[in-house]
Each structure stands twice: as structure tokens, then as C-alpha cells.
Image: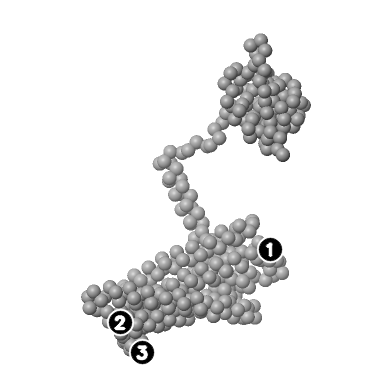
Amino acid sequence: MREWAEFTTQESGGRLTVAISGPLRVSSIGKLDPQLRAIEDPVQTVDLSEVTEVDTVGAWVVQRFVEEHSATVVGASEQADVLMEAVRDAQTTADVKPPRLPFFTRVPEFMGEKVIHWLQGVKGTLSFLGAVIVAFFGSIRHPRRFRGKALVRQMELVGVSSLPIIGLMSFLIGIVIAQQGAVQLQQFGAETLTVNLVGRITMRELGVLMTAIMVAGRSGSAFAAQIGTMKLTEEVDAMRTIGVSPVEALVLPRILAAVLMMPLLGFFSSVVAIIGGAVIGDVMLDIPFLTFLARVQEVVPITDFYVGMVKAPVFGLIVAISGCHQGMQVKGNAEEVGLRTTQAVVQAIFMVIVLDAFFAVFFTEIGWG
């Protein structure tokens, strides 16, 4: 059972003495501290002869009480004297919190730090991209150094293993687009244009965009976590020690796999989304399934296919570079792996959406709108 520190008061000749007893430890002064704070009468003496144990927290509570009442300490043990003297010497009148800068100074300073960090991040990403390009041309000059088996394995992980989740996601997106589009177009008697809506938006935009986001969350995070764990366990340093380039062995196969598989995954996603739209067309709009698919071939121009296929490898490159770069930045502890993995996914999705907006304007200007 816990023993609490206690105190009693004795008054003699107009002088008030507070006698503290028990252990003055952090675990036993919970009741004593507020009781001492509640004493308002002037105290002349503090008796510590009955104190059994004392630590720094207990000494600080007593020292503060003594200074508030300008009292004299009697009966203190040698340990209590040493701790109270140390606490007294460590006291300071400085503010616990640093002074808060004015608003018009604080906000620009904060924004300046963010801009500098962003520029440093851009510089680091460009440097990493340069290292990847050097490794790529080095592999072309020395084909034996290229790790073909690693490339095939990463193509399987990025592409083949992603087919079920991307197919399910795309099918549901096609259903949602067709259903919501049909509801709105029926108000104008133009529900047959649902075919145009589903075909063009999936082949041109959503098929590749949603695939890139799924690959970023699935494969981009895996790249960052895998390489980050290898950095943490010093496997990357060991590779450098034995003369193996980590960029050639770890980064290049992952980037090439993402670049090569993204067009295939994007096309697969678009086709499955169109099939989902055809199912809704058959159920809700009485458009036969095969008629819906045949109509898609007529209303979707070939340029929409080209737009999607041009964007796909660029999105794959962005996702893979973000994941591998953040993984190579891991250092310190295991928490860094989680932070860098999160940054890889957020950075990849952000850049994919920004580039998609750029591509939309660009292809409209060249007449592929």
C-alpha cells in the first residue's frame, strides 16, 4: 500500500511550525503539494526530521514552500540539504515559453522555411532523377549489369498483382459514372449520351488517373518501405561496400517496371470501367450490352486513347521516383520509414494530379480536346 507524505502544524509563542513526515518522493507527494499550497498563515519553521526519503521533486516542493513563507528548515538530512540546494541553484526567472514573434514576422518566417524546404526537396528529387538517368545509360553501356530478373519480379508486383484491385475499382467507377450520368442526362432526354460520357472520360482521364493513384498507394508505398528498411538495416551501405550500385540494383528495376506496366494497367482500367458502364446501360437504360460496346467504338476518338497512353508512363515514372527517393532518404529510426512512406504516397498523388491538369491544357491546345 502506498505511503503518502503528510504534515502537521504546531504553534508556539506565535510561531507556526510545519512538520513534514513520510517519503518526499514523486509518487507520494500528490496529496501534500496542494495542502501546502492552501496554507495562507505565515510559517516560520519547516521541520523535516520525520522525512524518511526524498527525491528532487520532493525537495522542489519543500523549497518552493520555504521560499514563499521565508521559513527556516530544521531537521533536514544530508540528502535533503543537497537536493534542496541543487533545486535552489537551478531556479531561474526566465520565461518557460520563448517569446512569440509578432504575426507579421512569424507568418513570413514560417512561409519562408516552407519554401526553402520545398526547394531543397525539388533539388533532391532532381539529383535523384539524374542518378537514375546515369544508372540507366550505364546499364545500356554494360548490359550484364542490368538485373533482368529483378525487373520481371517488379513487373509482376506492380502489374499482375495489381489487376484484381484495379479491375474491381475501375468496374465500380464505371458503374457510378454511368448511373449518375444517366440520371442527369435523362432530365434532358439525352440518356443515350451516357455512352459518350463513360467512354471518353474513362479512356481519356479517369482510367489512367485512378490507376496512378492506386499504384501510388500500393506500389509507391511498398517501394519506399522496402528501400527504407534496407537503408535502416544498412543493407544499402553494404551494397556500396561490395561495389554494387543501389540505384542500379534497387531503384532502376522498380522505375522501369512502373513505367512499362502503367500503360497496360491504364488501358485495362479503362476497358473494365467501360464494361461496368455497359452493365448499367443494359440494366437502367435498356441499351444492350454489346450495343453499348459497339457504340463506344464509334463515339470515342482514337486521340483519347493516345492521350491516356501518353500520360500513363509519365505517371508511372512519377510514382516510382517518389517512392524510391523517399525510401533512400530514410535514416535514424523505424519511425522514419513510416513518415517517408506517407510522404511518398502524398507526393506521388499530388504530382500526378498536377501533371494531369497540365496534360489536359496541353492536349486541348494541340487539338486533342
Q: CA distance from mark 1 to mark 2?
A: 60 Å
Nearer mark to the viewer, of 1 and 2: 2
- Count neighbours of disc 2 (C-alpha within 10 A) and say few if under 14, some if 14 to 19, many if 20 or more: some
Q: CA distance from mark 3 to mark 1?
A: 57 Å
Q: Quadrant of residue 250?
A: bottom right
Q: Dot 1: what SS?
A: loop
Residue type at tag 2: Leu
x and y percentages locating residue 286 in the rendered image: 30, 85
Most foreground residue, 72 or 248 = 72
Residue drawn at 45 percent across, 81 percent down = 268
Instruction: Tell me the tag on residue 99.
Output: none
Q: Is residue 314 visible?
A: no
Most foreground residue, 205 or 22 = 22
x and y percentages locating residue 235 in the rendered image: 68, 66
Residue drawn at 60 percent across, 79 percent down = 153
**Who comes first in sequence, dot 3 or dot 1?**
1
Mark 2–mark 3 CB contact (< 8 Å): no
Query: What residue would you read off at disc 2?
Result: 285
Q: Is residue 222 visible?
A: yes
Query: What residue would you read off at disc 3?
Result: 290
Residue drawn at 27 percent across, 82 percent down = 192
Nearer mark to the viewer, of 3 and 1: 3
Query: What residue would you read off at disc 1?
Result: 234
Q: Residue furthest left?
A: 188
Most foreground residue, 187 or 41 = 41
Q: Residue furthest front?
A: 1
Q: Dot 2: what SS?
A: loop
Q: Quadrant of residue 1?
A: top right
Nearer mark to the viewer, of 2 and 3: 2
